[in-house]
Amino acid sequence: MSHTTTRATTPAMSLRQRFSLERFFTGEGPEPGPIFLAQRRVYILPGKMGVYFAAMMLIMLLGAVNYNNSLAYALTFLLASIFFIAILHTYRNLLHLRIDVGQAPAVFCGEIAQVPVILDNRHNAARYALKLQLRDQHHVSIDVAGDQWQRNNVPLLTTQRGRHTVPRLTLETGFPLGLFRAWAYAQRDVCYLVYPAPDQHHRLPGESSYHLDLQGDRGHGADDFAGLRNYHTGDSLRHIHWKTVARGQGMYTKQFGGDQATELWLNWDSLPKLDTESRLSRLTRWVLDADTAQLTYGLRLPDAHIPLGTGLVHQQQCLQALALYNLDTDISSP
């Protein structure tokens, strides 16, 4: 008996899902793969001009009936046929498109992330005047040729650090006459990373407690050769001592004259007077400046410890740790 009840309720549940008002206004939610715009995913309604056009046809029809004018009837029915044909063309302009949303490169808070969107048109007919818009953001207008795919970057203003899901994408078109508005929703389960906004404090910490090894001829100056040190991940390949590598003695990095510190620790506890976000902003600035100065630096946070290193990968690791500090997200997750 329970089996019969299940069979009776499943079609009803499927029908409610198919015509759900929530899906009409918000879409399907995050989905794992490229999205195909089948018939049930494309919506269409008259636009403002379509309403005006329909009102005009009604007035013309009343006039034709009142005066029994054959030419007025002909013109009214001609415009009505154009009106209904526009429904088909506007709807077809979105139908059967394939959409994929990629992961945007990481940016600093307050900057505009560029979310890559790929539209794949596998039909011969071109798609014109498509508008791509992330929720509450500016739109991008594009055309896609027949049997072609096209990648476009859609802007997304960032307002909060951390890892966020890319918001819902809306595809919209009014082609060809602007009488109707057809739209569809697409949302992939992809994320983007937002680093803390670096503050305006450009000077690296100068107190001796921040530095290791302040002796002369230990920096990255370009004067005279000052010796070798152990290789750190991210060191420039130009500074590697290849002779020791060839002899099987391990990897060492050449050092040159200069009186600047080569090893710098950026410590959370060194900024006790600042609040959490201000500390993160200051440390972000220091990471950028230390990388620009080609220092070997590390980062100490209450919930993370990034060892000494240099290079782009090390910089991104430090910035990611700052972006995800005190958030319920694993910093090692992609």
Image (tube, rainbow, N blue to C red):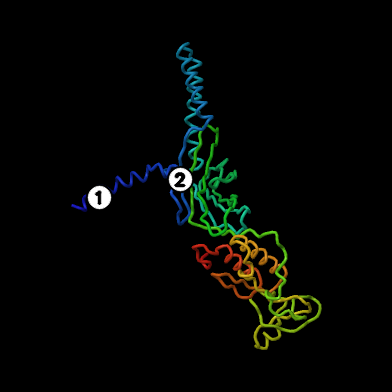
Q: Which residue ends up furthest to the right in the rendered image?
A: 223
Which is more toward the observer, 281 or 313? Answer: 281
Which residue type carries mark 2?
A: Thr
Q: Is residue 307 left or right of residue 207?
A: left
Which is more toward the observer, 30 or 158? Answer: 158
Number of numbered markers = 2
- Residue 245 image label: none
Q: Is residue 290 above or below residue 80?
A: below
Query: Disc 1 on helix, strand or loop?
Result: helix
Q: Position of residue 161 (x, y in %)?
A: 57, 58
Which residue shows up at 51% across the image and 41% down it?
93
Which is more toward the observer, 108 or 86? Answer: 108
Q: Which residue ends up furthest to the top in the rendered image?
A: 67
Dot 2 or dot 1, earlier in sequence: 1
Which residue shows up at 59% across the image and 68% down it?
317
Q: Position of residue 136 (x, y in %)?
A: 55, 45
Q: Is residue 185 above or below residue 311?
A: above
Q: Position of residue 87 (x, y in %)?
A: 48, 34
Which residue type carries mark 1?
A: Arg
Query: Disc 2 on helix, strand or loop?
Result: helix
Which residue shows up at 55% across the image and 63% down it?
324
Task: State yes or no: discs 2 and 1 in contact (Cβ < 8 Å).
Answer: no
Q: Is residue 258 left or right of residue 147?
A: right
Q: Is residue 312 left or right of residue 42?
A: right
Q: Is residue 249 above or below residue 202?
A: below
Q: Which residue is mark 2?
A: 26
For the residue carrying disc 1, how many other residues have a C-alpha within 10 Å: few (<14), some (14-19), or many (20+)? few
Q: Which residue is mark 1?
A: 7
State which quadrant residue 108 falls in.
bottom right
Instruction: Name the front one of labels 2 and 1.
Output: 2
How far apart in space, not on screen, are marks 2 and 1 (Cα)?
A: 29 Å
For the residue carrying disc 2, how many other residues have a C-alpha within 10 Å: few (<14), some (14-19), or many (20+)? few
